[in-house]
Amino acid sequence: MGYQIQGNVAIVTGGSQGFGKEFTKLLLKKGAKVAFSDINVEVGRQTESDLQKEFGKENVIFVRADVTNDEDWTSLWDEAEMKLGAVAILVNNAGIGASLGWERNVDIMLKGVGKGTFLALDRMGKNMSGRIINIASIAGIASGFTSKIEVSGYTMAKHGVIGLTRSFPRARPAPFSKYGVKAYALCPWFADTQLLREEISDLSKIERSTKTRVLTVEEVGKSLLTALEKDKDGACYLIFPDVPLIDFPNCNENLFALSVAAGWILKKAGYEPDVIGWPVVLAVGALLLIIFYYIFAILKFMVW
Ligand SMILES: NC(=O)C1=CN([C@@H]2O[C@H](COP(=O)(O)OP(=O)(O)OC[C@H]3O[C@@H](n4cnc5c(N)ncnc54)[C@H](O)[C@@H]3O)[C@@H](O)[C@H]2O)C=CC1
Ligand SMILES: CCCCCC(=O)/C=C/[C@H]1[C@H](O)CC(=O)[C@@H]1CCCCCCC(=O)O
């Protein structure tokens, strides 16, 4: 059934251009009212005028707001509520390039997402309903794609966003939900936007070096609607060219359990090395699989 977009009000940060503009358009097409924000006022006003022509002045507004500023967040939310109605969907999308330094990357793309998320919990929580969609990146799941440590702020921020998103279902098991608010994250591969073109002017360079084409804005936009349709709390969707949207498993959590199991089994067997590495964890995982397989086979035999 999915989360209902029609008739709801959304806030999209960084909505003047790129993914944010596409998310705004798609939400409007699906019958939502949208307040999009940005620090780029010139492009924001132009986008507002274009979208108002297409979807009506009563359905879409631009608000100048910097995601790093608490007062801007409050006035953005107040204005959206006053002009459009109670906000039910927040898309934390605003972002900058990796080359702008780790502190700005973390301020805008991690602390900015945190500010939006905790304000959303406060405001949406009053209505016991809402959805937060965080725009992370493949750099939020995997790290060390480049050899330059100077650009790791982007990865720091995006990993943090995945951590925040994954915290949602555990923190508030569904039936006892304190706020009624779910979160999910989108993790796109490189996509053709102004942001990428400012960092790497010749996109074919990336395509050649990674042997993978860059995504279109439309491909990323579509995945927002799929995520709202699936409505799975804590899900992190990997968006990669020419494969379906991937509901990326919480590998670290599963590997954590397996690693501890490996350590425990080795200790019980009287073997306690200083450190357990990846091959040992995998070997114990395989051993456990074989044991479960035989237990299952014996149980099947006993029942039938
Ligand atoms: N383009 C790509 O290759 C990928 C982008 N992403 C993420 O997608 C999100 C959107 O990026 P794009 O659409 O590519 O970029 P974009 O540059 O086209 O749009 C980002 C918008 O965010 C705004 N913004 C920057 N700082 C802000 C602030 N402090 N407060 C409010 N707005 C601010 C910019 O003015 C801009 O309009 C970012 O979070 C980015 O990290 C994720 C994966 C791939
Ligand atoms: C490294 C995989 C990136 C996946 C897609 C992505 O998020 C790309 C974003 C670029 C954005 O368009 C402008 C940028 O500066 C981003 C590139 C960031 C690369 C950081 C790699 C850091 C690392 O190797 O740890």
Image: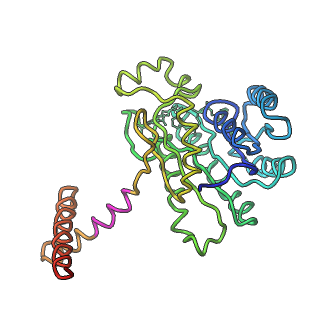
Q: Within the magenta stretch, is there residue 256?
A: yes
Whole-percent x and y of residue 104?
A: 59, 40
Residue 233 shows in the view = yes
Q: How many marks?
A: 0
Quadrant into which the N terminus falls: bottom right
The residue sitting at the front extreme is 304
Q: Where 118 sits versus 21, above or below?
A: below
Q: For residue 298, what is the image quadrant?
A: bottom left
The residue sitting at the bottom extreme is 302
Q: Within the magenta stretch, is there residue 84?
A: no
Q: Nearer the viewer, residue 116 or 49?
A: 49
Residue positioned 47% across, 49% down in the render: 159
Q: Where 263 sits versus 304, above or below?
A: above
Q: For residue 258, what is the image quadrant?
A: bottom left
Whole-percent x and y of residue 235?
A: 49, 55
Q: Which residues are magenta?
A: 251-260
Q: State left or right for residue 249 relative to residue 121.
A: left
The secondary structure that most of the magenta stretch takes on is: helix
Whole-percent x and y of residue 10?
A: 72, 48
Whole-percent x and y of residue 108?
A: 62, 43
Quadrant into which the C terminus falls: bottom left
Q: State left or right for residue 142 relative to residue 185.
A: left
Q: Where 28 sits versus 43, above or below?
A: below
Residue positioned 21% across, 81% down in the render: 303
Residue 164 shows in the view = no
Q: State left or right for residue 233 relative to residue 13.
A: left
Residue positioned 39% across, 44% down in the render: 142
Q: Nearer the viewer, residue 247 or 139?
A: 247
